[in-house]
Image (spheres, rainbow, N blue to C red):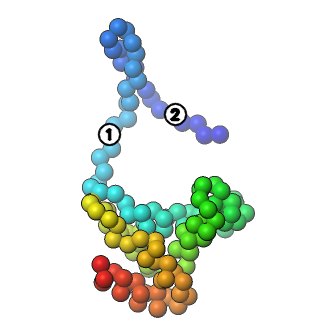
C-alpha cells in the first residue's frame, strides 16, 4: 500500500464553500522542453533490468504485464540494455526537445542494439549522430 502525505490549505470561497489550495511551491523546470522519449525508455530499460536481477519479478512477461505493454514491446525496450555503456550514457544525456520531433527514436537504435560488437555499435552510433 502506498501512502501519500501532503499539506493542504483550505480557502473559503463564495457562499462559504471550501476549496483546496495546493501548498507545494510551483516547480519551474531548469530547461525548457521535454526529455526525449528514447532517453526515458533507456532509463526504464535499466530500471527493469535491475528489477529482474534483484528477483523482484520473474521474467520479461511479468514486466510487460506490469507496464501494460505487449511482450514484444518489452523485448524492444529491454534490448536497449545491449548497447555499449557509453552509448547508453549518451542516450540518457540527450538534450531536451524544445520543439518538433525527437532527434532519435528507439526504432533508430534497434539495428545498433542487435550488434554484439561494441566497436561496431559505436561506429553505427557515430554515423547516426552525424546524420542528424
Q: Quadrant of the N terminus?
A: top right
Determine crowd level at label 1: few under 14, some 14-19, many 20+ residues with C-alpha closer than 10 A: few
Q: Residue furthest top?
A: 15
Q: For this view, does 13 lie left or right of residue 81?
A: left
Q: Secondary structure at mark 1?
A: loop
Q: Secondary structure at mark 2?
A: loop
Out of 39 and 5, give the one closest to the viewer: 39
Residue 77 visible in the snapshot:
yes
Residue 82: percent from left, percent from top: 55, 79
Name the image quarter holding residue 105: bottom left
Image: 84 above or below 61: below
Image: 28 above or below 61: above
Determine crowd level at label 2: few under 14, some 14-19, many 20+ residues with C-alpha closer than 10 A: few
Tag shown at residue 5: 2
Query: Residue drawn 45% across and 62% down?
Result: 40
Name the image quarter holding residue 10: top left
Q: For this view, does 66 lie left or right of residue 11?
A: right
Residue 79: percent from left, percent from top: 56, 75
Residue 55 visible in the snapshot:
no
Tell me whether circle 1 and circle 2 mark residues in contact (CB < 8 Å).
Answer: no
Name the image quarter holding residue 86: bottom left
Image: 31 above or below 72: above
Q: Quadrant of the C terminus?
A: bottom left
Out of 76 and 55, give the one closest to the viewer: 76
Residue 51: percent from left, percent from top: 64, 62
Image: 28 above or below 84: above
Query: Residue drawn 32% across and 65% down?
Result: 101
Spatial separation of the CA atoms under disc 1 and disc 2: 17 Å
Query: Residue drawn 54% across and 69% down?
Result: 77
Q: For this view, does 84 lie left or right of residue 34?
A: right
Question: Which tag, 1 or 2, sits closer to the chain's start?
Answer: 2
- Residue at which label 1 appears: 26
Amino acid at each position: 500500500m502506498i501512502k501519500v502525505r501532503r499539506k493542504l490549505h483550505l480557502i473559503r470561497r463564495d457562499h462559504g464553500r471550501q476549496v483546496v489550495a495546493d501548498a507545494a511551491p510551483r516547480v519551474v523546470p531548469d530547461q525548457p522542453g521535454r526529455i526525449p522519449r528514447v532517453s526515458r525508455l533507456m532509463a526504464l530499460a535499466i530500471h527493469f533490468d535491475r528489477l529482474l536481477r534483484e528477483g523482484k519479478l520473474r521474467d520479461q512477461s511479468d514486466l510487460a504485464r506490469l507496464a501494460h505493454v505487449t511482450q514484444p514491446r518489452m523485448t524492444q525496450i529491454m534490448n536497449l540494455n545491449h548497447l555499449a555503456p557509453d552509448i547508453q550514457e549518451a542516450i540518457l544525456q540527450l538534450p531536451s526537445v524544445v520543439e518538433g520531433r525527437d532527434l532519435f527514436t528507439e526504432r533508430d537504435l534497434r539495428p545498433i542494439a542487435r550488434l554484439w560488437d561494441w566497436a561496431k555499435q559505436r561506429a553505427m552510433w557515430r554515423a547516426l549522430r552525424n546524420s542528424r
